[in-house]
Image (cartoon, grey):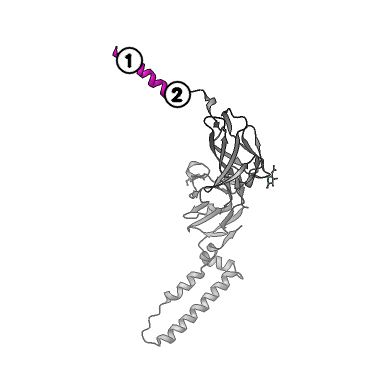
Amino acid sequence: MIPSKMAIVRLLVCFVLYASLGHVPSSLGVILRTTDKIVWVNEFEPIELTCLIESISTNNPRIEWKKIKSGIPSYVYFQNKITGDLEHRAQLREPANILIFNASRSDTAEYRCEVAAIEDQRDFDEILISLAVRVKPVVPRCSIPESVTVGTSTELRCLENEGFPASQYHWFYNNEELPRDPKSSPRFVNFSYIINPDTGSLKFRRVKKEDAAEYYCQARNDAGYAQCSPQMMEVCDVDILGIFFKSFGGVTVAVCVFALIYSIGRLRFHNKTNNGNNYNWSPRNGAVDYGDADEGHFRHKSSFII
Ligand SMILES: *[C@@H]1O[C@H](CO)[C@@H](O)[C@H](O)[C@H]1NC(C)=O
Ligand SMILES: *[C@@H]1O[C@H](CO)[C@@H](O)[C@H](O)[C@H]1NC(C)=O
């Protein structure tokens, strides 16, 4: 009957599919496997890249390892020897694993294990493993203004470039870690700042008296952390006259005196060149120079670099 013929054909098709999908006895060829295709390790720690031989019938297969960095392959295991970048820093372990004794950041790359078994029907297999070496952050460079004026905006910055993966930045206010969102914590609910943990920026749109504190920043990643030393940020009132009198003998006085002399000079110059007619000099022109020497501006710009 036709239906039973159809059934036989279906069975045959199933068997062929089954066989072609690799469910045949595997002794016909070399097959590799690894425990991890993506491997992370901290710098200066040992790491083993696994290349397990699932099946093989050849007795002495040829084993090779290549390192592929920026698309360029180089040998790290060739003719039964560790060579190239890993020379004296690694060894081959049964069956075809590579053990790196002390990972270095330059080991971040892809590694390919290749096994050739000439006596096998399927006589070659390879497996690709990507290795990423975590690097601890170094001490970040922190830029914290020594002094800012109430109501002005200011930005504290923090950066380091060694950490891998890239560091996340955390700011500390008098040794207390500032939460990412001040509204999330009862302690800092009345604070208003913006932290960008990726760039290391801590921004104040309008500085308040309470923002005066000792600040430091910590750069963190999965390999560790590093921090800069604390630096005091003072918050001054807008009382320029007060500041002027408080800091006699300082830079302020010098700058102000210079600005005064300069604008008197300008006034005289203008009077001469204008020669009485077309007299359009206004006191506001002179005031601009005072503005540049203004205490708030001057101190605000000076930052403390560690
Ligand atoms: C690993 O290498 C670094 C620098 O190359 C060295 O300082 C460190 O002592 C080594 N660690 C071990 C466990 O050998
Ligand atoms: C925050 O401000 C409110 C209103 O000014 C005040 O009642 C509260 O005590 C403040 N909270 C803290 C933790 O300072």
268 lies left or right of 83: left
Considering depth in this image, is 144 or 267 the residue closer to the camera? Answer: 144
Outermost residue on the top side: it is 1
Amino acid type, callout 2: Ala
- 271 up-or-down from 143: above or below: below
- 129 up-or-down from 295: above or below: above
Outermost residue on the left side: it is 2
User: Is residue 265 in sight in this rendering?
Assistant: yes
User: Is residue 45 in sight in this rendering?
Assistant: no
Q: Tell me the quarter of the image containing the C terminus.
A: bottom right
Magenta stretch, residue numbers: 1-19
Q: Measured from the top left, where is residue 94 in percent x and y? A: 64, 32
What kind of element bears circle 2? helix
137 lies left or right of 266: right
- 111 up-or-down from 155: above or below: above
Outermost residue on the front side: it is 119
Q: Residues within 10 Å of mark 2 (few under 14, many from 20)?
A: few
The question of residue 283 being in magenta is answered with: no
Q: Measured from the top left, where is residue 217 in percent x and y? A: 58, 50
Mark 2, residue position: 19
Q: Which numbered disc covers residue 171?
A: none
The question of residue 15 being in magenta is answered with: yes
270 lies left or right of 160: left
Q: Main secondary structure of the magenta part?
A: helix
Amino acid type, callout 1: Lys
Q: Measured from the top left, where is residue 79 in percent x and y? A: 63, 41
What kind of element bears circle 1? helix
Mark 1, residue position: 5
